Image (cartoon, rainbow, N blue to C red):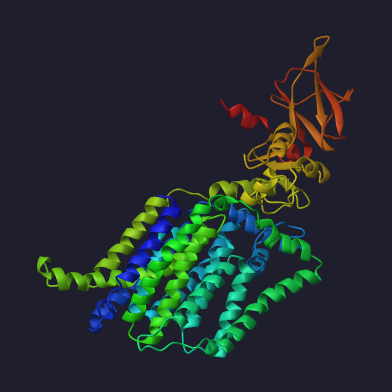
């Protein structure tokens, strides 16, 4: 099932659950102390298993291409390179800045992504704790506990949050914001704190603008709705709290913006986080009919809110439930309707809250079955923990079926970094796609992701990778990849030679003609640097540009010739540093069929 279909079905399920929302009496706390203790032990065991499984997936789950991209930006901060100006990025900077001390402590190591992933676990814990707090306030501690368990094991949320990405911090801040918002009487201090948290989230991701819009809409709708007693909250009473929240909201964004202005990087900063990401007709913007999804759901959302409000134990809880429900549903339907690109990490703030609103119905099933169908049960009643425990087991099974632990998905990226560190030195450039080589500067300033490729296709960004490769004397590139634009890809294919998991400047030497029976191997050099000639069998010997070849030498850009003195199979021109560090194009090629 496609992730977008799954999210849509989950969103619809939450709306349906709201409309048929169970009475509080069906999912409230246990009254017997023994039963309550047993359930708490079960929840504790589930959370313990979750932690161990989470750590296991850190070391086994496949590495997404976004992870080294973000870590490359962190590497840039550690080495004094300013984000946006010296290292291109199209995300807000706060997450990368906060990760800089840990990366600096770890140093350049091939498995660096794994401990950086471990650092995501506290954010995962904060997210689940905030979810528990929201569930406790809206419903009961029991609902909060089971919501944390079920959301924590939900595979799309679990797997995406394993990865090293800003969205983990962004999601934790969002749920913490909601927990603070509904956690007590609304005061100016609480409103200011909510604003600061949202401003911090904005410093982590610009997608916070959508969260701000839906939260404002949800609060406004909840305030304007008449309460069961017939009264209504005055908008004038909300004025001071709005001012306090806006004041807090501006703190972090203004501080970040001021930092880049003082650093003289306002233009690249603004381009990176705003201009680069705005491309008319990008992705889902090409399909205007999808914008009808949000308007089509609004009547059902209104219906669901009315049911939630009227079934709440009091007006305060009803308003809180309405705000969280509307924020969750408006976010997902606005995202599906209006956001141009929908990578799976955009859904992280939605999953926990959606599962929270389904949890009361899940916990209500045993008592409902006992009340309505108890005569069909072998025992007098269905155990209260049976349904949530069964669903937790099914979620773990789904998780292991989707991504089995015995498959190591981290080995390829780790092996690539082993060769990066072995082949290059700190001053070398490497041409990669999105920063997957992490520890070296990229000659082409833009990462080759969806938006950049669209801009290149439209001529908004020039496909001038060859010029950058020559200007920076880039001698190393990753293997051939269809993510490279046509002109840059052709240049790389023609002038770089695979030597393992990387390519280096060089080429196979092929004879177009012979002179008196002695083959002449002409070739052109695009990047002036030290080169060596290697033979497929034995040591290369002959004449390079009319002089005896005795080892690596500097070659200027232009035309050159090599005339071997003996047959040794094929010959290749290779970047001398690669040869000196044990790399060769022939072992890899000789293994191919």
Of residue 346 and residue 297, the one placed in the foreground of this image is: 297
Q: Nearer the viewer, residue 461 or 554?
A: 461
Q: Is residue 349 left or right of residue 240?
A: left
Q: Quadrant of residue 40?
A: bottom left
Quarter holding the C terminus? Answer: top right
Reply above or below: 279 against 121: above
Query: What residue sits 74% from the left and 17% below the top?
Result: 567
Seen at 18% across and 69% down, the residue is 369
Residue 433, can we see it? no
Q: Nearer the viewer, residue 337 or 138?
A: 337
Total numbered labels placed on residues in the image: 0
**Front-most of 584 and 294?**
294
Residue 1 x/y as whole percent: 40, 50
Q: Residue furthest top?
A: 516
Percent coordinates x, y for residue 16 in the rendering: 33, 66
User: Is 352 situated left or right of 540 in this image?
Assistant: left
Q: Residue at x 66, y 78 (%)?
A: 250
**Residue 113 falls in image quadrant:** bottom right
Q: Is residue 193 left or right of residue 227?
A: right
* Residue furthest out toward the right: 547
Instruction: Give the residue drawn at x 59%, y 54%.
Output: 66
Question: Does residue 243 appear anywhere in the picture?
Answer: yes
Q: Relative to residue 12, is residue 133 depicted above or below?
A: below
Q: What percent of the width, then of the height, locates residue 356?
A: 38, 71
Question: How far across and how far down the image is residue 76, in percent?
Answer: 72, 60
């Amino acid at each position: 099932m496609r992730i977008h279909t799954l999210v849509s079905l989950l969103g619809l399920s939450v709306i349906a659950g709201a409309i048929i929302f169970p009475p509080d009496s069906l999912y409230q706390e246990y009254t017997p102390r023994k039963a309550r203790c047993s359930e708490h032990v079960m929840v504790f065991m589930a959370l313990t298993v979750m932690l161990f499984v989470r750590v296991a997936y850190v070391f086994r789950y496949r590495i997404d291409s976004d992870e080294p991209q973000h870590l490359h930006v962190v590497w840039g901060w550690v080495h004094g390179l300013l984000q946006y100006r010296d290292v291109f990025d199209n995300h807000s900077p706060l997450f990368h800045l906060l990760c800089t001390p840990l990366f600096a402590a770890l140093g350049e190591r091939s498995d660096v992504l794994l401990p950086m992933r471990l650092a995501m676990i506290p954010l995962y814990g904060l997210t689940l704790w905030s979810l528990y707090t929201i569930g406790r306030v809206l419903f009961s501690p029991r609902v909060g506990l089971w919501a944390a368990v079920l959301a924590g094991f939900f595979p799309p949320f679990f797997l995406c949050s394993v990865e090293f990405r800003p969205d983990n911090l962004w999601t934790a801040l969002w749920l913490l914001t909601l927990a603070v918002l509904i956690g007590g009487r609304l005061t100016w201090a609480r409103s200011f704190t909510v604003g600061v948290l949202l401003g911090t989230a904005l410093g982590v991701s610009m997608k916070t603008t959508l969260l701000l819009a839906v939260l404002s809409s949800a609060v406004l709708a909840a305030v304007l709705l008449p309460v069961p007693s017939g009264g209504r909250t005055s908008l004038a009473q909300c004025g001071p709290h709005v001012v306090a929240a806006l004041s807090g909201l501006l703190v972090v964004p203004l501080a970040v913006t001021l930092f880049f202005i003082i650093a003289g990087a306002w233009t690249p900063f603004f381009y990176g986080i705003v201009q680069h990401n705005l491309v008319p007709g990008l992705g889902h913007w090409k399909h205007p009919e999808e914008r009808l999804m949000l308007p089509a759901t609004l009547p059902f959302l209104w219906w669901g809110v009315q049911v939630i409000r009227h079934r709440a134990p009091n007006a305060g809880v009803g308003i809180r439930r309405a705000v969280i429900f509307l924020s969750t549903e408006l976010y997902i339907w606005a995202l599906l309707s209006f956001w141009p690109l929908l990578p799976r990490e955009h859904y992280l703030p939605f999953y926990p809250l959606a599962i929270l609103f389904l949890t009361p119905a899940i916990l209500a099933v045993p008592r409902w079955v006992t009340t309505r169908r108890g005569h069909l049960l072998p025992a007098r009643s269905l155990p209260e923990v049976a349904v949530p425990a069964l669903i937790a087991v099914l979620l773990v099974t789904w998780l292991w079926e989707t991504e089995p632990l015995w498959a190591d998905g981290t080995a390829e990226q780790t092996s690539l970094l082993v060769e990066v560190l072995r082949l290059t030195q700190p001053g070398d450039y490497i041409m990669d796609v999105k920063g997957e080589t992490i520890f070296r500067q990229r000659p082409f300033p833009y990462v080759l992701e969806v938006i950049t490729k669209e801009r290149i296709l439209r001529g908004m960004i020039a496909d001038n990778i060859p010029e950058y490769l020559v200007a920076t004397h880039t001698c190393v590139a990753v293997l051939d990849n269809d993510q490279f634009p046509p002109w840059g890809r052709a240049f790389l294919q023609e002038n770089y030679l695979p030597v393992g998991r990387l390519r280096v400047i060089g080429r196979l030497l092929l004879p177009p003609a012979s002179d008196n029976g002695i083959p002449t191997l002409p070739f052109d050099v695009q990047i002036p640097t030290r080169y060596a000639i290697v033979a497929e069998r034995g040591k290369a010997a002959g004449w390079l540009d009319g002089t005896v070849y005795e080892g690596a030498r500097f070659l200027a850009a232009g035309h050159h010739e090599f005339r071997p003195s003996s047959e040794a199979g094929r010959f290749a021109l290779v970047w001398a540093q690669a040869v000196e560090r044990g790399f060769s194009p022939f072992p890899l090629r000789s293994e191919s069929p």
